[in-house]
Image (cartoon, rainbow, N blue to C red):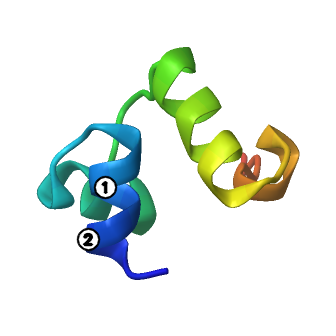
Amino acid sequence: MSSGELAQKIGISAANLSILKTGKAKAVRFTTLEAICKALDCQPGDLLEYRPD
């Protein structure tokens, strides 16, 4: 699935999805995370990584 298709499926702009993908987002809404997990059939832990400063 392309980034554009995913953005359309989850209801956000391609630019906002790019910000999430590059790790430049300061936060992510739970509804967005849920939509991504539904679209990709995955769990939040598959997408998130903790990095201490």
Position of residue 44 relative to residue 24, above or below, is above
Mark 2 secondary-structure assignment: helix
Q: Using the rendered view, name the quadrant where residue 17 is placed.
A: bottom left
Mark 2 neighbour class, 10 Å CA radius: few under 14, some 14 to 19, many 20 or more? some
Position of residue 44 relative to residue 3, above or below, is above
Q: Mark yes or no: residue 14 visible.
A: yes
Q: Nearer the viewer, residue 26 or 10?
A: 10
- Residue at horizontal 51%, vertical 18%? 31
Which residue occupies the extreme bottom position in the image? Answer: 2
Which residue occupies the extreme top position in the image? Answer: 30
- Residue at horizontal 69%, vertical 44%? 37
Type of amino acid at the residue the image marks with label 1:
Ala
Position of residue 39 relative to residue 14, above or below, is above
Mark 1 secondary-structure assignment: helix
Mark 1 neighbour class, 10 Å CA radius: few under 14, some 14 to 19, many 20 or more? some
Q: How many marks?
A: 2
Task: Determine whether label 1 and label 2 are within 8 Å by CB.
Answer: yes
Question: Residue 45 at x, y = what percent?
Answer: 86, 45
- Residue at horizontal 36%, vertical 33%? 26
- Residue position for label 2: 4
- Residue position for label 1: 7
